[in-house]
Each structure stands twice: as C-alpha cells, then as structure tokens.
Image (cartoon, rainbow, N blue to C red):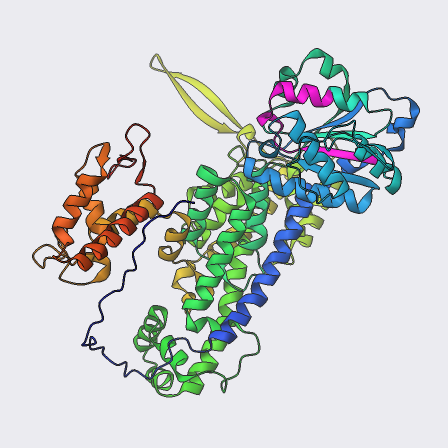
Amino acid sequence: MEHERCYIYTPPQSEERAAKRRRTDSSNHQAQLSARLDIYRELWAQQEERIHATLEEADRSTLENIVNFISSPSRNHDQGLTCILTGLIIAGPSIASHGPFFDRLGRKIRNETNSAYILLTSGECPNLKSLLKNLIKKVTSRTEDDDDDDIAQGVSSRRGPKVLDFDLQHVQEWQTRNHVEKIVVAVQDSEAFDAGLLAEVIDLFHSWLDRLPFVLLFGIATSAESFEDRLSGRALRYLEGEKFNVTQTDKVIETLFGATVASTDVPLRIGPNLSRRMLDRQKDYVQNVQDLSDGLKYAYMSHFYANCTSIFLKKDITFKELPKEVLEAVRNLPSFRKWVELLLDSRKTQEVRKLLDSDEHLFETVKANVISGQEVLAAVTAAVIVLVRLREALQMTSQVPLSSIWIRAASGELAESPLLRETMLSIKKVSSDKLGQVLASFKAAESIYLPVDISAFQNALEDLLKQKTDSTPLRTQDDVRTNSLRTTVVAQKVELSKHKAALSEQDKLYSELIARLHDDLENYFNGTFIDPKELFLSEILIYDLRSPLTEVFQPKPRFAIERALGSPHDYLGCDCCSAAGDKGAEAALSATQPATAILYQLYLESGSLINVADLWAAFNAITGEEGEDNDHKTMALFQRALAELRYLGFVKPSRKKTDHVTKMLWKGL
C-alpha cells in the first residue's frame, strides 16, 4: 500500500473584519419576480408547442414514407425475400440535427408498427463484436455487465450450451417471445463507420435473414452515391431499398423562425439585432434546430427576469398587484421620456402631469398602450407575410427568405426599400394569368390585418376575362411587351425611340384595375412598415439586448481565465494585486496575489518543459516565509496551484522527464 504526504492548510483568521457598507435602499429590484416567471412559463409553453408542431410537420411526410416502407405487407420476409430491406435516409450535412430526427423516427415506428427500433452510432460500435453486443443489449433490454468476454460456448446449462453475449440467437429468442414483426436497425452516422465493418454487418444480417426480419436504415450526410461507393459489390447485392430525403435544416429553421418569431400572435418579440445574430450563428456554426430553440428560450428568460416592466405582458393584470417600483421603472424608460416630450410639444401638459403624479392613470395608460403596441407589431408581421406571399406568387427571381424580410421590417428599413420598390414595380407589370395567383395568395392572408378588398378585385378580373374573345392574357400599359423600339435616321444618324403600342379597351380596363391594386398595396405597406423601436413601451414588447446573449452564445472562456490569472486585480478589485496600485497596468509578482495567479505568471516565463523543482524554488522565493510550518503551508499552496493549472489544461506530466511538466498553452495563441 502506498502512502503519500498531505498538508492541512488553515487560512489565517483576520482579527478585524472588513467594514461593509450596509444597503440602505429599501426598493425591491426584483419586484413581482415570481409573477414574471409565471408569465414566462406560460408564454414559453406556447412557444414549445409551436416548435414541436413545426418539427413534426417538417418531417411528417418523410416519417410517414419510412413507416410505410417498413410496415408494407408486400415486403414481408415470409414471401421469400432474399435481400435486406434498406432505407437510405439523406439527412443533410447538419450532423447535429441527425440525432433529433432519428429519435422522432424511433417514436413513430414504435407507436405505429409492431417493430423493434435500435439506434446505433459509430462511437459505441468500434468493431463488429461491440456492435453486436450493443444491438443485443438494446433489443432485449439486458442489464447484465458486458465486460465478461470470456464466456465459453462449451459451458453447459439447464437449457443446453450457454450462448455468447454477442450471438444473435439472443435476439431470435427475444423475437420469438415477443412476436415482433420487424427488427429495425438504424445507423445514425453511417459515414463514420468503417466500410469493412458495414460490409461485415450486412453479410451477417443477410445470413440471419431467414430467422430474423432485419430492416436497415442508414443515415447519410452526403449522398446515396457516395455511400454506395464505399460498400463492396457483394454487400450491395444483399440490399434492396429506397432513398428518403429529409427536409434540410436551413428550411426547418426558416419555418421555425416564422412560427416562433415572425408570427402575428406572439406577445413578446425578439428584436432584429438579436434575431440576426442568432440566424447568422446558425448559418456559420451550428445548423441545429435545438440550439435555435435554446436561444429563444434564453432570450425569454432574460427579458422576464431582468426587466420588471415585463409584468405588463400579463393579460389580466390589476393595479393593486403592482408595486410602486414597477411604475417608477416605466417612468424611466427611454420610450416613455420620448413620449412625454411629444406630449409637451403638443402642449398636453395636463396629461404629462397626470402621468407623472398619478400611478393609477399611468397604469391604465401603459396597459392600453401595451395592447395597442402588440396590435401594431402584429400588423407589421402580417405585412411581412403578405409581402413574402406576394413575391412568391409573382415568382420573383431574387428569393429573399421570410426571416430576412422580417428583420428588415423590425429594423425599420423596409419602408421605401429597393426590395419593396422592386415588388411594387412587378405588380404594375403582372399579366392577367398571374394576377389570379396573386389574389389567391392575398385571400389566404386576408384575415391578418389586410385592409384590401380582395373579393372585389377577383370579381373585376373575372368580368374582364369573360369579355375576352381570345386566349392571350391581358397586359398593362407598363408591360415591356407593349413597348417597341422605333428606328429613325436623321442627318445620317440612327436614333432609337420607344413606342408604346395601342392598347385594347380590355387592356385599358385591366391597366386601371392593376393601378388601383398597386395604389392600395402601396398605401398599405407604407402605412404599416414603421420603425418598431419608435413605439411607446417598445422595451416591454421587444427584447433586443445583445450583451447577455453574446456571453452565452459566443463565450470566450480562455480569454477570461487568462485575464483572471494574469491580472487578478481586474476581478478582485483590490490595489494590493496591481502593479504599483495602477489597475490599468499588468499585474506584477507579489505575495498578496492568489497562488494560482503567481504560478501562472511564472509559467508564462518558462519554456516548453518546466522543471518543477525550479518552479517551486521561484514560487517559494515570492510567497514563502521562514519557519517549518510556513514551509508546509507554502508547499500546500504550490501543489494546489499546480493541480489547478493542470485541471485548466495549461500543463501536463512529461513523459521525457519525470521531474518536469509540459507546457500546453501559450498566451494569445
């Protein structure tokens, strides 16, 4: 038995306790926190329902096709099928989204078919033996320890020879007892498996096909052709199946953004800056639906936890349940001050006096403006949806996603923008055969804040089409096909001039109809696309603070650790750790600094191999004091500091020299 010395470090007890300034402010900075958290849970529960419904709808057709492929009676093994049923699932390049998809697929297969579903990954299946053991364990739900690999088949038992723990006979016995029709084996990351291992698995499953009804599902990130190229011809002859395409993650994220952020019935809006940052992070780094959901959840938590005025988002709020601090916080909002200035410019001094003196009047005003502000934001979102559907119906060449248009609208940049001008110009040139599709897209959006009488335009279009005698579509006077170029020669010079062809009476009436539609839509968009940040009480209705989200979504832990160890006074706020009392300067070595900070600064001055004895000598020279007890305490501090540096990944034991440690990180690299 080995014995090692240890030291008990007892920090010195200070005789005088540092004086602390007692808080004299009696205000409650977390007013109605429990009520705000209840509102957060209620609103986020609604968002979670939208997220789950969106994900289920995005994969619904693919999941149904896979389930039908598995449970089809024509693919029964009893009919002499000699190949393994195989589904090639093209899940896309986003590896992070494969896991949730296969989890949803497994739940649907278990619920709708009499099949066993086993999910395998490359991390748990390095070889054939481990793959079979994991497969048997997941199928039979065994709980025995799998470390016993020395089970001999010759060892007898009451039922005969004992079967090895990686023999598929276990699965056969389990399938006989449970009467399962299919055993679906899903390989989530098939391209991470060794090609030889996949060929061995296919060969083994094919040899058991007359006894076990296997179905294989391979998750593929690239393409089915590249997956087939990795397999041998013999393995491919054992497979027979179909290819299934999963909805790509970028489309799912776009749909999810429209359901959770760019929706007309969302009480709390995520601001444009934060939305742009979250979407850019998805495109550049993550491409994971769950991370977008987590980001939205963190934004909701930050708004309701840090903003006491968010309690006004409660539907049935009363004046009696509000503390005075909340109303004082409303009076300090920037949008409130701007609104008061506008009232003073309008010479409504009595209204301003009531807002400043009467809490009850302020409560009623805020409550009414929160409701009206939500309606305004819903109208802006509805106008974005109308614009997106309009561009889709017009079949615009430049496809701009809903999220991008909504961010521009939420930033106040969409009014009189080139995007809007391009769309309205296309309206002027639309022909009668496309106008029906445009009006149909408006009809679907008529219930969401669209003040244009679409039925009247549809009836007028039908009347014009009934009067037509030929099959050519009606065109407007702005259509380029009604213009022609005329060439004239003047003084031996060729001049080109545009000439507008004569329009028929029906084309003139159609042009007037398009002009009315254009004017109505232009007035609608110009009156709806306002800057939401200029709304009164926008701080309650919109959350757009990037600072707390940046530290969560884009943390810099190494920079923070290096700064804490190199300049501990930045975090401790003391003068004893800084250089000559200057907090802006780099920290100098002193005994008052934390032991880990001292050792880290000595570590920076060392090379790639550090002699621990020399490091101890330098550390003892700085912090050590005379006396045997002090030496023991200094050694304890040194060992703890060295252990912390090793835990943080700065050093590791050296294999070249036992009394040295290897330097792992260099500052700034």
In this rendering, the count of numbered labels is: 0
Relative height, residue 432 to residue 562 (above, below): above
Can I make out residue 516 in this image? no
Magenta run includes residue 235: no
Tell me the residue at 20%/75% (across/down): 18
Is residue 157 left or right of 470 when viewed as pictured?
Answer: right
Q: Residue at x 51, y 40 (%)?
A: 287
The quadrant of the rendering that contains the N terminus is: top left
Using the image, determine if residue 266 lies above or below residue 519: below
The reply, left or right, for residue 352 in relation to residue 595 is right
For the view shown, which residue lies furthest in the right direction?
Answer: 79
Above or below 449: residue 168: above
Give the quadrant of the C terminus: top left
**Residue 145 or 506: which is nearer the viewer?**
145
List x then y, in percent, for residue 631: 18, 54
Residue 178 position in % (x across, y down) = 86, 42
Residue at (62% x, 31% y) in the render:
125
Residue 503 coordinates in the image, percent (x, y): 59, 34
Magenta highlight range = 182-202
Q: Is residue 586 left or right of residue 204?
A: left
User: On the picture, is 408 further left or further right than 447?
Assistant: left
In depth, the one of 281 and 72 nearer the eye is 72
List x then y, in percent, for residue 375: 53, 65
The residue sitting at the front extreme is 1
Residue 193 inside the magenta-drawn segment: yes
> Is residue 103 among the parts visible in the rendering?
yes
